[in-house]
Image (tube, grey):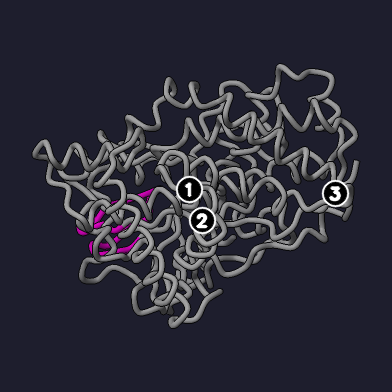
Amino acid sequence: MSTDTSEQVLEYPFRAPSAVEPPEEWAKLRQGCPVAHIRLPSGDKAMLVTRYDDVRQVLSDPRFTRNLAQDGAARITANEGGSAFENKDAADLAGGEAHERWRRLISRWFTVKRISAMQQRIEAMTHQLVDKMVAKGPPADLVSELAFPLPVWVIAEILGISVDDRDRLAHWSNAMLTMTQFTQEEVDEAQAEFVQYLTGHIAKKRAELGDDLLSDLIRAADEGEHINERLLLMTAQGILVAGHETTSNMIGKMIAMLLSDRRRWEQLLAEPSLVRSAVEEALRFDANAGFGLPRFVTEEIELSGTRVPGRTTLVCNMAAANRDEGAFERADEMVLNRSPNPHLTFGAGAHSCVGQALARTELQTVLSVLLRRLPTLELAVSPAELPRREGLLVGGIERVLLRW
């Protein structure tokens, strides 16, 4: 990309050639215009960061805030309530001591130790779902049969929510992550139903505390922590949306990536010990990660020699940064035994994803179980035909049809 395009405003998000390939703009921008001017779905302007070192810096530097409810910050979507990023309530938690305390309380539920203790249940759930899928016979849609229900079950367990409610939870979760897929009316309706459901759920928990995250937060509130009803609601909503949608999409994308060049699947069948590093590489190599993470900066700064004025919204595209040749050898190849693999898929710094141990465990479990149970697995359509999920903040594949 020549320097004369550096002032050009690009429409964002970009279109990719297929659900498993990156948009061609990424490589061009990383090389020639690492801090680019973009127009968001709302019509507002922002700047896009695509290089590894820049994305890492923006996500780790406390001068960049997650609070997009501030004056002058770009709106991501045209919806009145904004997206999950611009939520006024979420803004209260975007930084400072309150966020630190809240994160500490939540983190207890996502420690490697606690997740390891859940691993057997996650594996049992996976086997159960694979049993159902096998009983129906091929072709099967991995997304609806396994990738979608598994993370809802797991998050529902952490929140102490009954399994019967999981389909409704999934619908609300989609509406919360909308960019263009739902109308304002549908978003408002889903939000109202979700809040009503969770309010009832929290009331039940108060009456009878259990061994789950919400009961823990209620106990902490009783012990003097500043946790009000609204914060409990936001926590339940946030964990459900973040913990379900992203992992659900990633399961579908990981299997699609591994089967889109079947030599990858064969390599894992031959060397099952590579499951852990293969999951990390799928997380790095994901070309369809979605919108990226927005940040707002109030003071003027410089990134890769580009002046970023104060009161600018920056969008960090971690998926583009994960393919930066300066950070990864053979960045454009899926190397299943890559080590080390310091990808930015879970963010960086103080706000990196609190649920990453859980996501890794779910992905590793699903991959191990499928390799053992269905070694002959293959895509029932060509990779180019995999239908993308459109209009949401997180990228995914609508259906991953498989046969075996």
Residues in magenta, as a range: 296-313
Other residues around mark 2 within 10 Å, as few (<14) / some (14–19) / many (≥20): few
- Residue drawn at x 58%, y 34% is 362
Give neighbour class at mark 1: few <14, some 14-19, many 20+ (Cα, 10 Å): few
Badge 1 is on which residue?
Answer: 162
Q: Earlier in the sequence, mark 1 or mark 3?
A: 3
Under circle 2, the secondary element is helix
Q: Position of residue 64 (x, y in %)?
A: 27, 50
The amino acid type, in three-letter code, at marker 2 is: Asp
Residue 41 at x, y percent in the picture: 48, 75
Residue flagged by tag 3: what amino acid is it?
Answer: Lys
| Count of picture labels | 3
Could you say whether the residue bearing mark 3 is in a helix, strand or loop?
Answer: helix
Q: Quadrant of residue 70 in the image? A: bottom left
Q: CA distance from mark 1 to mark 3?
A: 25 Å
- Density class for disc 3 (Cα within 10 Å; few <14, some 14-19, many ≥20) is few
Q: Nearer the viewer, mark 1 or mark 3?
A: 1
Marks 1/2 in contact by CB < 8 Å: the verdict is yes
Identity of the residue drawn at 71% across and 33% down: 127
Q: Are marks 1 and 3 in contact (CB under 8 Å)?
A: no
Residue tagged 3: 136
Q: Is residue 115 left or right of residue 108?
A: right
Query: In the rendered image of this protein, does residue 398 appear above or below residue 335?
Result: below
